[in-house]
Structures are given as C-alpha cells and as structure tokens.
Image (spheres, rainbow, N blue to C red):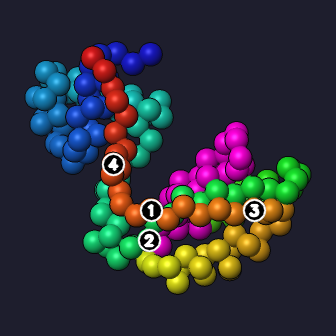
Amino acid sequence: MLSRKDRDILRELQKDSRLTMQQLADKVGMSSSACWRRVRSLEEDGVIDRYAVQVNARKAGFGLSSMTHVSLARHERKNVDTFIREVLRHPEVLECFATSGEADFHLRVVVEDMEAYNRFLDDFIFRLPGVSQVRSNIVLKEIKADTALPFRD
C-alpha cells in the first residue's frame, strides 16, 4: 500500500517528471534526501515503471488514430502467442488489451494517415494466423487523453 507521501510524490511526478529532486521535495513537504529515498524505492519496487514524454500525435505528424478490435477464430495458444508477440513488435500499436466481450483484443493504433492504416491492416493484422474479424473505429476528435492515475489524498 502506498503512503500519502508516496501518492503525493507520484501525483507531482505525473504532472512534471522533469522536476529536480529539490523541487519535488519542496512540493511534497519533505527533505531532498528523504524524497530521493522514496523515489528510489518507488522505482525499485516497480511502482514507477519509467519516465516518458507525452508527444502531441497530430503535431508530430500522426494524423490518424484508431481503436482496432480484433477477434481470433480459435483461441489456440499458438495463435494467441503469435498475436501478442507481433503486436509487441509494432510501434504503431500504442496500447493493446485482452478483453472479454465481442472482441478478444482492443488496440489503440496511431499512424500518419488512412493510407498508412490500410498498410498496417494489410501487411500486419490481416496476415496474422487465427484472426477472424477486425473492426476499426477511427477517432474523429480526441476529448481526453491523459496518462496520470487518479491518486487521492
């Protein structure tokens, strides 16, 4: 279980992971050395998985985003393993979830344009063994895109 100070640290780092240790310590009301020890512990425990930059996809030239729903014909272990292994190799797949419901997998795919998305489907998804159905929902407008977890006091 995370302590209140741990949650405070994580909340601040989610806002700005470029804070110096002194700036972070000041924001959460700790000494710099105590704050450093807590951050180090959160990293070692895997609570802090990594540090990243959030890039505006459209401004970076990635104008098409799709929620792609993939169903497998049969859930043979080999097909599932192949699907997962190949999805992990494709950087256009930003997120992939195995889910219950109509589709087996839900992918968030980001590419330059519709032509690039068609290539992604033709050259990758449609060639995977066991894929029986693919449905695409093209994102028309991004309403909310956040990565911060909702830590409460």
* 1 vs 2, front mark: 1
> How far apart are labels 3 and 2 at the CA level?
21 Å
Label 1 CA crowd tier, 10 Å (few <14, some 14–19, many 20+) = some
> How far apart are labels 4 and 2 at the CA level?
16 Å
Nearer the N terminus, badge 1 or badge 2? 2
The three-letter amino acid code for the residue at tag 2 is: Leu
From the image, tell me which residue sits under label 2: 64
What is the quadrant of the N terminus in the image?
top left
Label at residue 50: none
Nearer the N terminus, badge 4 or badge 2? 2
From the image, tell me which residue sits under label 4: 144
* 139 in magenta: no
Res. 31 image quadrant: top left
> How far apart are labels 4 and 1 at the CA level?
12 Å
Left or right: where does residue 138 sit relative to residue 61?
A: right
The three-letter amino acid code for the residue at tag 1 is: Val
Nearer the N terminus, badge 4 or badge 3? 3
Which span of residues is magenta-colored? 90-111
The three-letter amino acid code for the residue at tag 4 is: Lys
Label at residue 139: 1
From the image, tell me which residue sits under label 3: 133
What is the quadrant of the C terminus in the image?
top left
> Residue at point 76% right, 74% down?
127
Label 3 CA crowd tier, 10 Å (few <14, some 14–19, many 20+) = some
Would residue 85 be seen by someone viewing this image from the given angle? no
Left or right: where does residue 12 sit relative to residue 7?
A: left
> Residue at point 59% right, 79% down?
118
Nearer the N terminus, badge 4 or badge 1? 1
